[in-house]
Amino acid sequence: MGIQRKDFRTDRLFDSLEEATDFLQATKSDAGRRQLNDDTAREAAMRQTINEWLDSPKFSHYIKLYKDDSLSIESEQNETKKRGKQAALYRLRALEKIEVEEITPANKAI
């Protein structure tokens, strides 16, 4: 996205992004201002979605909740169901041991 007026030329250095954005908005047409505002709003929404995802509980939290709620072996009387729950617990423990690179604000795309 650039200024497409042939008669416009500038060579300025800005101290902040807000300063540069204000300058661009002052030099753009109405359609250009709307496009700039749309891009800014889209970027803010994307940042918010990523930050919400980063702040959400980890997968291991949900595995623990499931194990605590659904796979209690102590109360099970039926031996077949007890073995089935034990097998499910082993699978969940294997899932918990899988290491996945954690995404942090330092290495995220935006």
Image (cartoon, helix red, strand yellow):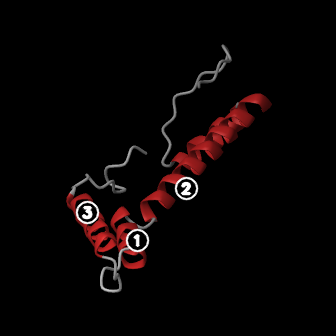
Q: How many numbered circles are shown?
A: 3
* Mark 2 or 3, closer to the camera: 3
Q: Amino acid at mark 1?
A: Tyr
In this orientation, which residue lies closer to the viewer: 20 or 1?
1
N-terminal label among 2 and 1: 2
Residue that mark 1 sits on: 66
Residue 69 placement (x, y as % from top left) = 42, 77
N-terminal label among 1 and 3: 1
Q: Secondary structure at mark 2?
A: helix
Residue at 52% of width from left, 28% of height from top? Answer: 11
Q: Amino acid at mark 3?
A: Glu
Residue that mark 3 sits on: 96
Residue at 35% of width from left, 86% of height from top? Answer: 75
Q: Secondary structure at mark 1?
A: helix
Residue that mark 2 sits on: 48
Label 2 crowding class (10 Å Cα cut-off): few <14, some 14-19, many 20+? few
